Amino acid sequence: MAGTEHVISVEELLSRKVNVVRTEAAQTSRSGNDGSRIEVQVIEKDSPRQQWLDELEKAGDEAADQKTGPKIQKVPFLLRDHKDAAKYFEPRVVSLGPIHHGKPKYRKAEKYKLVLANKFVKESGKDKKAESLYAEIEKKIKKLREYFDDDEEVMKNYDDEYLARMLFVDGCAVLQFMYYAVEDKFKDVKIKDDQAAFGQEDLFLLENQLPYQLLEDLMELSEKKGILKNSIERFIERHATFHTKNDMHATKGDKPAPHLLDRLRTKLLGGKSESGGQKGQTAGWYSYRNVRELREVGIKLKPSKTSSLTDVSFDKRYPGHLYLPLIKVDDSTGPNFLNLIAYEMCPDFENDFGVTSYICFLDSLIDHPEDVTELRKEFILHNLLGSDKEVAKLFNDIATDLVPNPQTYSEVKGQIQMMCDSKWRTWIAAVTGKYFNIQDQYFSARWGIITFLVSTLVTAYLSVIQTRYAAQQTWYAAHPPPGPCDDFCKK
């Protein structure tokens, strides 16, 4: 039986195709000096034990040779249990690529994809035909398949020919869709505004990504290559929250982008594909909790010069200013950020969790709707979602169970904490009332009492001074000092 231990002759051992493992007890002969028989542990090649040992050894080799490029894959399991997983991670109107392909809810969108693909082919050039364009993609299908995670069971359902047809239609449709989006031409293919809006959100879902190399290959086949590339840049810039004249327009990093979601992340981080924001020493312990508490110690919020998530800084000169990037919050904010976070959590994507760290930092400043109100009043946050309560809830939900990079923003956090620990700064902010409204319902009761007492003492002191001065003026009026000639006249 495979995997059992028994005693065999040397001749029998050499004649059998087995793996031999010598044990401590098997180092000596069992039958004298002729060496004809030894005790060995025989493990058949097809035994479960040997298969496990081979798999263990192979795993080490695969880890050493693993490519660093991230693959298109499903959302990591840590986020799959999110209470709104379907809302944030599944396409709303259109499926792209193999993961959600063929689901009944996306059948209607298949017709629109064919229409868009047809437009792409027709606008590629007079001599361009669907058959010739498809043939070029079919030649590269084995390479394109490598951009998807091999561990996903879904990939085993599609042979190369079917996958090539799927990717060709989806790739052509996506390029034409982005072109129509920036040129406002959806009416040409009878796509309504609501369908277009949801479709744009679907383009940035992790499970809905297409290899960016596919888009590059298709653009190379079109006479509108330059126009299409420009459309992608404008499309991504439109979805990268706010953009200002100081923002970097280049969205490419040092490495080729694997898909559109990566391009969006790079744009949000200021043009650096692996940057995670302003860094410092390893994070420590921070006592402040929200915008309201920052206001209590006199810290004011100001918009940064750019909308890059890395553009977070702190000016520690009194009274202290925290600069935050501009952000627009609407229906796409939740899906976009959660899919970027899911992308950063993928095991094959080496990064420093730039988006995750930003969301966690922003969440540390937002506990209540009033915190959102302050950000909105300072023109840092533009609320297109609804009430400030909805925005606060959104960021609190997104940031649940996230682990940021402990070094990201650590210098800023440390400077804020130093300000909070400075008693004299806190006292001045509370006494003067210059940096916040004393009547604010969220003002701390203890500082309200202190301010009242100090104000009373100052008022009383000034009243005493004023009374004494008035008394002196009255006395001098009744008893004027002698003039310069009074004594001479008396003589």
Image: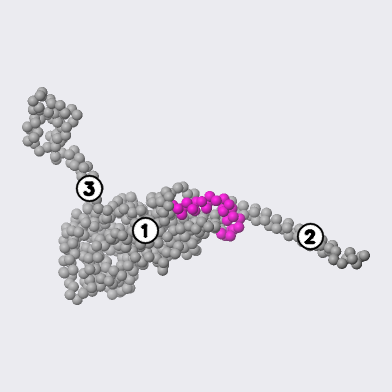
Element at label 2: helix
The residue to which callout 3 is attached is 62
Q: What quarter of the picture does the N terminus occupy?
A: top left
Tell me which numbered mark, 2 or 1, is placed earlier along the sequence: 1
Q: Amino acid at mark 1?
A: Phe
Q: Residue at x 18, y 27 (%)?
A: 25
Give the quadrant of residue 361. bottom left
Question: Does residue 365 appear in the picture of this structure?
Answer: yes
Q: Nearer the viewer, mark 3 or mark 1?
A: 3
**Foreground residue among 400 and 276:** 276
* 336 displayed left or right of 379: left
Residue 17: % across, % down:
10, 38
Residue 426: % across, % down:
56, 53
**Region of the chain picked out in magenta, as a range:** 410-439
Q: Amino acid at mark 2?
A: Ala
The residue to which callout 2 is attached is 471
Measure how far apart labels 2 and 1 are at the Cα level.
Answer: 70 Å
Tell me which numbered mark, 2 or 3, is placed earlier along the sequence: 3
Measure how far apart labels 2 and 3 are at the Cα level.
Answer: 95 Å
Element at label 3: helix
Asked if labels 1 and 3 touch by Cβ distance under 8 angstroms, the answer is no
Element at label 1: helix
Q: Amino acid at mark 3?
A: Glu
Q: Residue at x 25, y 61 (%)?
A: 211
Classified by dominant secondary structure, the portion drawn in magenta counts as helix
Q: Residue at x 26, y 62 (%)?
A: 212
- Up/down of 53 relative to 29, above or below: below
The residue to which callout 1 is attached is 337
